[in-house]
Amino acid sequence: ATLRRTLAEWPKPVVLDRVWLAGGDRGLLDRIAAMPVPEFPLLGRDLRRAGVAPGPELGRLLADLRAWWLAGGCTGDVHAELARRRRGA
């Protein structure tokens, strides 16, 4: 989860360089190099389609959902979480 979060926040070459400079072992470097970069699966237009009005609240909701996704190791179902929040659950 930590590696996925790191790759979601920083470009892969930067992560590899930092690990290498910190004396990271070859196995860790190879593992990072082979990992796919997690991409947050929502955009503002997705929230608009879900009925969220444009404006500052849309931006706050998008940022909050991304923080939730990162905290969960970049694996949570953001569409289900958005639906849950829209229902007020």
Image (cartoon, helix red, strand yellow):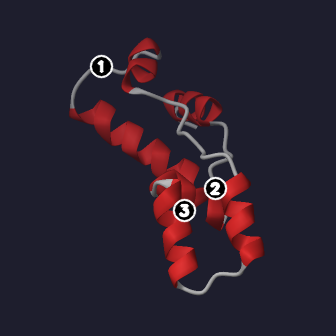
Q: Earlier in the sequence, mark 2 or mark 1?
A: 1
Left or right of 34 on screen, residue 60: left
Q: Which amino acid does label 1 sit on?
A: Ala
Is 14 rendered above or below residue 54?
below
Is the Cβ of the residue at disc 1 closer than 8 Å to that at disc 3? no
Q: Residue 1 appears at what percent x and percent y?
A: 68, 62
Q: Which amino acid does label 3 sit on?
A: Thr
Question: Where is mark 2, residue-wise?
Answer: 72
Q: Earlier in the sequence, mark 2 or mark 3?
A: 3
Query: What element does badge 2 sit on?
Result: loop
Is 36 rendered above or below residue 77?
below
Report the number of discs: 3
**Of the residues tagged 1 and 3, which is closer to the observer?**
3
Q: Residue 57 appears at what percent x and percent y?
A: 28, 34
Q: What residue type is labelled 2?
A: Gly
Rate crowding at label 3 as few (under 14), some (14 to 19) or many (20 or more) other CA atoms within 10 Å.
some
Residue under the point 46% across and 63% down: 14
Question: Which residue lies most toward the bottom here?
Answer: 23
Query: What element does badge 3 sit on?
Result: helix
- Residue 38 is at least partly visible in this image: yes
Quarter of the rendering containing residue 5? bottom right
Question: Where is mark 3, residue-wise?
Answer: 6
